[in-house]
């Protein structure tokens, strides 16, 4: 997977009993390369079964039949129907395939849904009279989600992605099959999902997001509502909410729109009068949304108006609810699922585990020789060890439950500085090398520390520090350095070290040119101080 990472950091110094500083990070992720591998169908057989008996479910997509007397929902990869008043659920799809996101056809005789029964996610229809299923789309390398019928019942609008983890865009496919047509090209750099077709069939409401499939540590807003005009091919934005707007759902009379949005730390449903533009809360809080992930089942579960446009039927809190548009109290639609579900064979492997008092360590990290070359410090099994070089007996110096890393010898060889990491964050520690002594904590602020380096006189340590939650490093990424007193940036090619003039020396490369050394003179202080800011290239 290709990762684009932005890192900011501060190189600092401290006295041997002082403080270190800093690193911040935000990460951006691009999509994986296209995978068009073709599979012949699901290879597993249901060799086992499990019995479920439940009246609750998670992330249930719900749709109401055009006659208003029943509804369909998905649960654990199968589709079920119940009366609109609730009751025992009838299972209408079976097998190991994962079926989901059902929507009734306008005539009420078919259901379109997403299924991987062909070996990859595709659109299928179910004939409610005969029980026959028909595959509408082909190909197992990509993904389909959130199908919706056009009012004439001839076409299905859904979101299609070239890969299972990529950006999806609106497509229209005829119910007889065929290649279909992209309504919004992926070249536009947009993610478009959650189609809702207007009663006249001209406008397709959807949620739109610029750029990537998802972002770590995402900032609001992520999605907004938009409409696609089938006659002109134009797209117009229809919301500007800070907490995003997604999963538009239209009333049959064309008067109302319901959509989901984040408010503070929870998700709710808003209802909009399409004639006046007035809005109010329909239900808050409801089901969590899925804005921070790739949203492979849309950003919010599917919901539906009743045919008389007086209620919205959807799920939250594990239940199905009828939510009156007049704002009165929601009514639960109770359901009971009692089924025997086929599952695949149990996969088990035997792995030998070393349980003797001593055993070979297959990986050591951060090995560094002592100043006189006679000893070696290294990390094994997350502990700090020293040994006579080259074939001495390793001695565990710290013997703690914390993860140790990045040992650094003091110039006189009597101390080793190293960094730790635990549930509450990490610190810089130092410990005497002869063994038998307790480690001394140098820092006071818990964070993630890196690459400690002693000054030549053994009085100070230079290192990097990041907030405990922020750092996610990328191997072989070269950070950029900007001395606080200047305006230029260069790439840091190796960790900092100390210059004989009691300054910090940082190996750098300016715009890919020959490596040189940046000398940063510290302030005349025994306390820690920020010396330079670092930033990875985008």
Image (cartoon, rainbow, N blue to C red):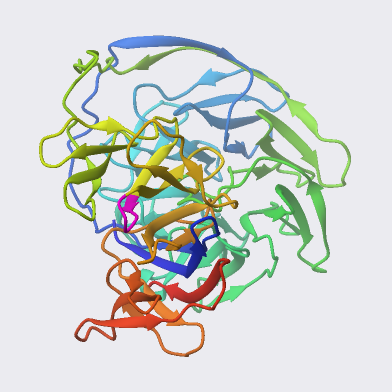
**403 on left or right of 17:** left
Q: Where's residue 245, x and y in %?
A: 65, 60
Pick the front one: 354 or 378: 378
Q: Is residue 411 magenta?
A: yes
Pick the front one: 446 or 125: 446
Pick the front one: 183 or 1: 1
220 vs 398: above or below: below
Q: Residue at x 45, y 54 (%)?
A: 449
Q: Residue at x 61, y 57 (%)?
A: 246
**427 on left or right of 219:** left
Q: Is residue 150 visible?
A: yes
Residue numbers of the magenta segment: 407-413
> Which residue, as the protein is rendered here, is positioned at the far left?
391
Q: Where does the C terminus fall, quadrant-wise?
A: bottom left
Q: Where's residue 319, x and y in %?
A: 68, 28
Q: Where's residue 77, x and y in %?
A: 44, 29
> Which residue, as the protein is rendered here, is positioned at the far bottom?
487
Pick the front one: 339 or 536: 536
Q: Where's residue 133, x and y in %?
A: 36, 33
Q: Residue at x 48, y 67 (%)?
A: 13
């Amino acid at each position: 997977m290709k990762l684009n990472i932005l890192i900011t950091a501060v190189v600092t110094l401290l006295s041997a009993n002082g403080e270190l500083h800093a690193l911040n990070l935000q990460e951006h992720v691009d999509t994986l390369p296209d995978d068009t591998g073709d599979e012949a169908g699901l290879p597993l057989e249901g060799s086992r079964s499990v019995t479920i008996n439940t009246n609750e479910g998670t992330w249930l997509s719900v749709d109401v039949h055009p006659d208003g007397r029943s509804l369909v929902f998905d649960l654990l990869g199968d589709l079920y129907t119940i009366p609109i008043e609730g009751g025992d659920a009838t299972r209408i799809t079976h097998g190991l395939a994962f079926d989901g996101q059902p929507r009734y056809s306008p005539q009420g005789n078919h259901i379109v849904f997403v299924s991987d029964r062909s070996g990859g996610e595709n659109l299928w229809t179910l004939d409610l009279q005969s029980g026959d299923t028909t595959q509408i789309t082909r190909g197992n390398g990509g993904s389909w989600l959130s199908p919706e019928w056009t009012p004439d019942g001839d076409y299905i609008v859904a979101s299609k992605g070239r890969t299972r983890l990529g950006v999806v865009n609106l497509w229209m496919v005829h119910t007889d099959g065929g290649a279909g047509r992209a309504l919004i090209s992926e070249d536009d750099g947009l993610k478009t999902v959650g189609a809702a077709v207007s009663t006249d069939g001209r406008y397709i409401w959807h949620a739109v997001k610029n750029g990537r499939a998802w972002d770590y540590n995402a900032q609001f807003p992520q999605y907004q509502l938009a409409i696609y005009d089938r006659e002109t091919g134009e797209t117009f934005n229809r919301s500007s909410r800070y907490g995003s707007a997604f999963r538009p759902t239209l009333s049959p009379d064309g008067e109302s729109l319901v959509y989901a949005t984040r408010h503070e730390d929870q998700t709710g449903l808003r209802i909009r009068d399409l004639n006046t533009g007035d809005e109010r809360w329909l239900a808050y809080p409801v089901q969590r949304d899925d804005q921070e992930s790739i949203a492979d089942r849309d950003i919010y579960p599917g919901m539906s108006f009743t045919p008389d446009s007086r209620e919205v039927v959807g799920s939250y809190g594990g239940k199905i609810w009828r939510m009156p548009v007049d704002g009165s109290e929601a009514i639960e639609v109770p359901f009971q699922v009692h089924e025997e579900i086929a599952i695949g064979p149990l996969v088990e492997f035997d792995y030998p585990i070393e349980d003797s008092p001593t055993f070979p360590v297959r990986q050591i990290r951060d090995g560094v020789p002592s100043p006189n070359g006679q000893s070696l410090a290294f990390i094994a099994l997350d502990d700090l060890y020293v040994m006579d070089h080259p074939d001495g007996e390793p001695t565990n110096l710290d013997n703690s439950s914390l993860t140790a890393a990045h040992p650094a010898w003091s110039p006189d060889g009597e101390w080793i500085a190293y960094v730790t990491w635990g549930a509450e964050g990490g610190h810089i520690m130092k410990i005497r090398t002869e063994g038998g002594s307790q480690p001394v904590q140098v820092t006071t602020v818990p964070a993630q520390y890196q690459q400690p380096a002693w000054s030549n006189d053994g009085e100070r340590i230079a290192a990097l520090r990041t907030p405990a939650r922020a750092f996610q490093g990328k191997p072989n990424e070269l950070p950029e350095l900007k001395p606080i007193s200047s305006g230029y940036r260069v790439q840091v090619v190796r960790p900092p070290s100390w210059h004989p003039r009691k300054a910090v020396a940082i190996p750098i490369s300016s715009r890919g040119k020959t490596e040189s050394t940046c000398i940063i003179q510290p302030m005349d202080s025994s306390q820690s101080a920020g010396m330079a800011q670092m930033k990875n290239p985008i």
